Image (cartoon, rainbow, N blue to C red):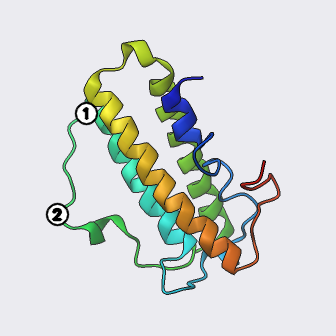
Amino acid sequence: MSHLTKGLYGENAHVNTLTIFDGLGIEQAGEVVLNQHSIWQILNHMIYWQEYILRLLKGEETIPPKHASETWLTEVKPPAKKDWELAVHKFTDGLNEAVRFAENEDGVSNGQVEHLLSLISHNSYHSGQVVIIRRFLNQWPPPTGGDTW
């Protein structure tokens, strides 16, 4: 497994990015604690930037947002359970797509490496926020395991 792949999945450096939303219901996903965004808002913000970076990786034209507020949902809670589940799957699918780029480390350009490193650091930052919120809600670790070895 490449260093980029390990970074995307959180191996060795931070919590496994694929597990941070495991076991959460829409009630917990919509809680606002510690004057933070809700987990629902964080998840959708992560999806926004992950999709943006995936477009860059594919060489598609992208237009950056004019203001950071454009990348955050104003709604705090998922409208329904299916919306929460679809968003988690969308994030996971996008992360796995980024990993497919990272696995081809010899065929990845310097610009693509920079995009992947940006995604790694962005996801790591917001994964940490999710873990802190989950700890506050007594919802950490997830059923699949947390950050202990």
The image shows residue 120 at horizontal and vertical percentages of: 45, 44
Residue at the extreme right: 143
Q: Quadrant of residue 10?
A: top right
Which badge, 1 or 2, comes first in the chain's sequence? 1
Check disc 2 and give the amino acid type: Lys
Q: Residue 65 appears in which quarter of the rendering?
A: bottom left
Residue 8, given in percent of the width and then of the height, sits at 52, 39
The tag on residue 60 is 1
Q: Secondary structure at mark 2?
A: loop
In this rendering, would 119 be left or right of 127?
left
Q: Residue at x 36, y 44 (%)?
A: 118
Amino acid found under the numbered disc labelled 1: Glu
**Which of the pair 91/120 is nearer the observer?**
120
- Residue 144 position within the rendered picture, expressed as x and y whole percent measured from the top left: 80, 52
Q: Horizontal and vertical percent for residue 57? A: 33, 31
The residue at 25%/33% (across/down) is 60
Q: Quadrant of residue 48?
A: bottom left
Determine whether 62 is above or below 86 in the image. Answer: above
In the visual, does 44 lie left or right of 55?
A: right
Mark identifier at residue 66 = 2
